[in-house]
Amino acid sequence: MIKINQKLKDKLWWLVISVDYDYSRITIADHDFNGDTLTLWLEDKHDFKNTLDECLQVDIPAKQFIKLIKAENFNSYEGSKIHPTKNYVYKTRIQINEPLAWYQHDATLTEQQWVRDATLKYLLTQLVETETRASDMV
């Protein structure tokens, strides 16, 4: 679960409202990963901005980014292994590399884009679900 503070929630809702609740219009204008934080700059596909300063900046701590990569199994694949002593084959998830190392060194540019897109989708889904749960409690 990505921690979203109230200020960011308000800005995300403003972006959602500005795209007329059409989440597919929200796109990642640019990104940066410095090892500690994944930064995404979000904008409306129908209203491209001239500078990143005009976009909504979302900072996601590396710990939360790692959890998302693991949860979505981006850094692993399903494969078969042979048991070292009993010599039988079994199916398991085979990890390619640790999540951040995989993202920075092993993932192709396309796979990195998939991870960022999944992060955006997860963030928006979490925003809507938490607000829905909060309104149900009232």
Image: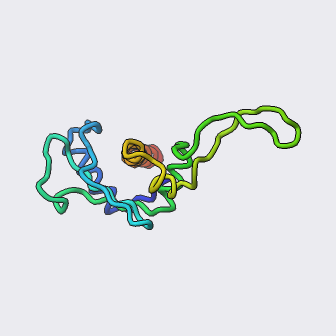
Nearer the observer, 51 or 96 = 96
Q: Is residue 66 above or below residue 107?
A: below
Answer with left or right where residue 22 lies relative to residue 3: left
Q: Nearer the viewer, residue 86 or 9?
A: 86
Colouring convention used in this rendered image of the protein: rainbow
Q: Quadrant of residue 53?
A: bottom left
Residue depicted at 51% across the width and 52% down the height = 102
Who's the residue at 24% across and 39% down the image?
25
Q: Position of residue 86 (x, y in %)?
A: 88, 38
Vertically, is 134 above or below 36?
Answer: above
**Residue 119 location, x and y as percent?**
41, 48
Q: On the rendered structure, is 67 left or right of 135?
A: right
Residue 16, percent across and down?
26, 45
Q: Position of residue 105 (x, y in %)?
A: 46, 55
- Residue 46 visible in the snapshot: yes
Furthest-right residue in this view: 86
* Residue 135 showing in the rendered view: no
Q: Give the total of numbered labels.
A: 0
Q: Nearer the viewer, residue 15 or 70?
A: 70
Which quadrant holds residue 37?
bottom left
Residue at (24%, 50%) from the top-left corner? 29
Q: Residue at x 26, y 43 (%)?
A: 26
